[in-house]
Amino acid sequence: MKTLTFPKNFFFAASISLIILSYVTGCSDSEDKKAVATGEHNPFDHPHEFPVTDIQKHKFEHEFAKQCVQNELRNSINKDVDEERYAKPCMCIATYMMKDLTAQEAKKFITEHENPRSLQIKFDSAAYHCLQQKAQSIQEPHMFGKR
């Protein structure tokens, strides 16, 4: 069996290539800073510079609560009773969602009548929060007078 030996040139070439590789990867950072400085659009970042006004939040809250009640009443048999029952949880969900509302989400919902995926995620979180509070207030039945 023959033992492999590496010549000194191999180690020299490997060390030079590592130095060049580290230099090239270190230089890529400056282009990202130039892109940010020139104001190029990054599609993965949403702008934080446009806050949502109180009027937009209030309008979103009431329109979202109204839409939530309408969606729940779609398969309801007794719409009058169910509308009163669903109004409070839907308003709680809309209020909870309104706290983290971005300007882009408000614009999509209010003017374009669209529900972006981020609103759906916030809805799931808000529904869990609001409906869990309601479930905690219900007490178990007391069997045979024991507590």
Image: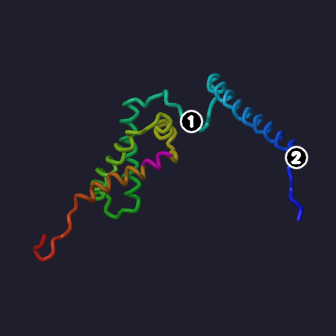
Q: Which residue is at 15% across, 71% downward?
A: 142
How many numbered circles are shown?
2
Q: Quadrant of the C terminus?
A: bottom left
- Disc ID at residue 7: 2
Q: Up-down: is 95 above or below 135?
A: above
Q: 35 or 47: which is nearer to us?
A: 35
Question: Could you say where residue 55 lies in the image, as x and y percent from the top left?
Answer: 37, 31
Question: Could you say where residue 82 lies in the image, as x and y percent from the top left?
Answer: 30, 58
- The magenta stretch spans which residues? 118-122
Question: Which element carries disc 2, helix, strand or loop?
Answer: loop
Question: Could you say where residue 32 lies in the image, as x and y percent from the top left?
Answer: 66, 30
The three-letter amino acid code for the residue at tag 1 is Asp
- Per the image, the residue denoted by label 1 is 45
Q: Which residue is at 47% across, 46% downward?
A: 119
The three-letter amino acid code for the residue at tag 2 is Pro
Question: Which element carries disc 1, helix, strand or loop?
Answer: loop
Q: Up-down: is 2 above or below 39?
A: below
Spatial separation of the CA atoms under disc 2 and disc 1: 50 Å
- Disc ID at residue 88: none
Instruction: Name the residue furthest left.
Output: 145
* 74 drawn magenta: no
Left or right of 117 on screen, residue 145? left
Q: Which residue is at 47% across, 33% downward?
A: 103
